Amino acid sequence: MADRLGTVAVAVEYRLAPEHPFPTPLEDCYAALRWLARQPGVDPERIAIGGDSAGGGLAAALALLAKERGEVHPVLQVLSYPMLDDRTATRTDIDPRQLRMWSQDNNRFGWGAYLGSQARHEVPPLAAPARYEDLSGLPATWIGVGTHDLFHDEVVTFADRLRQAGVATTLEVVPGAYHGFDVLEKKAEVSRSYRQAQLSALDAAVNGDTMQT
């Protein structure tokens, strides 16, 4: 992405759950965001953030935390099948035969590891961004998911709420795609198109005009 867009890219080595549950990974990401914004040659007004799966959930939470603290203002968030809502793990209406790569058992384990002791109490909205009430003031958003992804419903709902809050949002729903499809089937046309859509959104945000609704 850095080569194709002519930009600086930073990958954050945040500390991992379950040894380091929420909020440690999120605070690590925020520290990296503040560090990046201070680097010579980096325009702090043209920083995009993003991630896939659990990393997408962290990116969404990072955008919310940045809004709360008001120090750095990302221009775009790119969320690929993000893990946004711990409540999906308790749903009983999802057909497991429709899923690949990420199941309800995986989801329960993942949220339990990330939330740690918080799982036994009221879950903080910054831990599960779908619980965050006020989504206004967030950066423009590109968000994508497949129809056979466990996270499909929570992603679509989050995109709708972003739009309702006045956030410029592009939602990419890929028919028949499962969790991580673009990683496992990199050469498939649908995967190339999905990645190109992300690149186009990033290019517009950091190199050109900001993304339109």
Image (cartoon, helix red, strand yellow):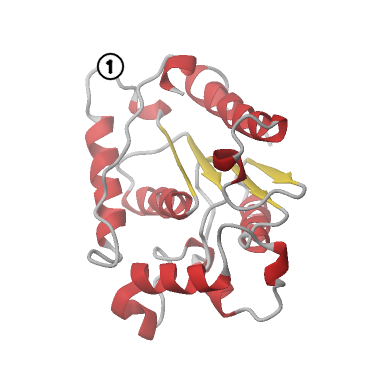
Q: Quarter of the image holding residue 143? A: top right
Residue drawn at the location 39% of the way across and 38% of the way down = 73
Judge whether 79 appears above or below 124 on screen: above
- Relative side of 115 to 151, left or right: left
Judge whether 127 appears above or below 172 on screen: below
Residue drawn at the location 58% of the way across and 32% of the way down = 198
Q: Position of residue 74 (x, y in %)?
A: 42, 37
Q: Position of residue 190 (x, y in %)?
A: 71, 34
Residue drawn at the location 65% of the way across and 57% of the way down = 149
- Identify the residue under disc 1: 41
Q: Quarter of the image holding residue 2? A: top left
Q: Position of residue 172 (x, y in %)?
A: 69, 42
Closer to us: 49 or 192: 192
Task: Determine the residue located farthest toward the right in the rendered image.
Answer: 175
- The C terminus - image quarter: top right
Label 1: few (<14), some or many (≥20) within 10 Å? Answer: few
Task: Determine the residue located farthest toward the bottom in the rendered image.
Answer: 120
Q: Quarter of the image holding residue 199? A: top right
- Relative side of 206 to 98, left or right: left
- Relative side of 129 to 127, left or right: right
Residue drawn at the location 54% of the way across and 17% of the way down = 208
Name the amino acid type tagged 1: Gly
Q: Position of residue 171 (x, y in %)?
A: 68, 44
Closer to us: 29 or 37: 29
Count of numbered badges drawn on the protein: 1
Q: Which SS class for mark 1?
A: loop
Residue 185 in sight here = yes
